[in-house]
Image (cartoon, helix red, strand yellow):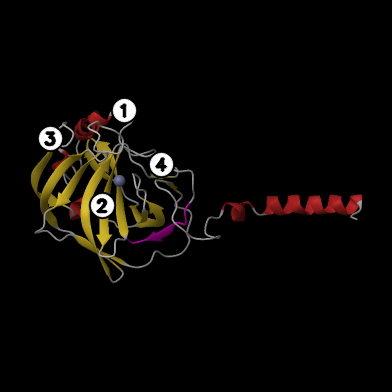
Amino acid sequence: MLSRLTTLLIAVATTAALIAAPAQARHVCTGAPGHVQSPVEIDRSQNCGSATPAITINYGFADGTMQFRDKNLNGVVDNHDDVSFVPDQFSDPHIMYGTTKYKLTEVHYHFDAEHKFQGQAQAPAEAHFVHASASGSTVVLGVLIDSVSVPASDAHDHPLTGVPTTLGDSWSIGSVNLTGMLPANKASFRYSGSLTSSPYTPVHWVVFNDHLEATSSTITQVKAPFGAAGNNRSRQNVAPRIYPGNP
Ligand SMILES: [Zn+2]
């Protein structure tokens, strides 16, 4: 049986250990790895090692179709719906994720942004570049977009300007500057997450550090059908393993 003094000493030692190790207690790079649910707040001070495998981006310009998608097919604008660009069959925008090719299947937008960097305000919009491999794995590149009166580039304004407000509409678009829709500086943060709408399947996420810009009036117009809440999933209260990379 432990004496009262021994019990007291154990309690003091335990308390001292807790006080001495708050950083370890917050560290998210230990424990079993796995995909968390997305989106998340990204703590850029977390570094679980270099991002692998290397990613090569092969975009350029593409023609294709813009869609105001009724993803639930329920005829009502809700927060799962989005505005998306789908490259045509003659374009081949893709990334190499290590030695595996992932085709760009679509670029869609969320208003407000879904991801957020710790210490920053939530951006008004976020573009998701969705890629699929032949075996069905998914890589998504995320770009946060700020709202300004005169953007440095019209790369995002081009597909978003004049978007019809009728759910289910689609329209042709040419010369979408996919390369220009990504930041020039490819510093980014990777984590293992999920799609942010049904079926919430696993995603290799790459979220760029630098924001891009779109015209305030354009963002206001495209967001309007979704109402004040927009079309975004709430951030999930989880801390994934963060891997800084370029990209
Ligand atoms: Zn998305």
Quarter of the image for the C terminus: give it. bottom left
Judge the density around disc 4: few (<14), some (14-19), many (≥20) Cα neighbours within 10 Å. few
What is the magenta segment's predominant secondary structure?
loop
Per the rendered image, the range of residues in magenta is: 240-247
Q: Distance between the residues labelled 3 and 2?
A: 21 Å
> Up-down: is 154 above or below 32?
above
The residue that mark 1 highlights is 228
For label 4, the SS is loop
For label 2, the SS is strand
Residue drawn at (78%, 54%), measured in percent from left and top?
13
| Horizontal relation, residue 7 to residue 15: left or right | right
- Circle 4: residue type: Gln
Q: Where is residue 51 in the image (x, y as percent from the top left)?
A: 39, 64
Judge the density around disc 3: few (<14), some (14-19), many (≥20) Cα neighbours within 10 Å. few
Residue drawn at (12%, 55%), measured in percent from left and top?
61
- Circle 2: residue type: Phe
Q: Which of marks 3 and 1 is nearer the N terminus?
A: 3
Q: Which of marks 4 and 2 is nearer the N terminus?
A: 4
Residue drawn at (48%, 43%), measured in percent from left and top?
237
Q: Distance between the residues labelled 2 and 1?
A: 24 Å
Residue drawn at (22%, 38%), measured in percent from left and top?
70
The residue that mark 3 highlights is 162
Q: Where is residue 109 in the image (x, y as percent from the top left)?
A: 25, 42
Q: Position of residue 102 (x, y in %)?
A: 25, 62
For the residues bearing labels 4 and 1, Cβ distance under 8 angstroms: no
- Circle 3: residue type: Gly
Front disc: 4 or 1: 1
The residue that mark 4 highlights is 120
For the residues bearing labels 4 and 2, Cβ distance under 8 angstroms: no
Q: How far apart are marks 4 and 2 (CA)?
A: 22 Å
Q: Which of marks 3 and 2 is nearer the N terminus?
A: 2
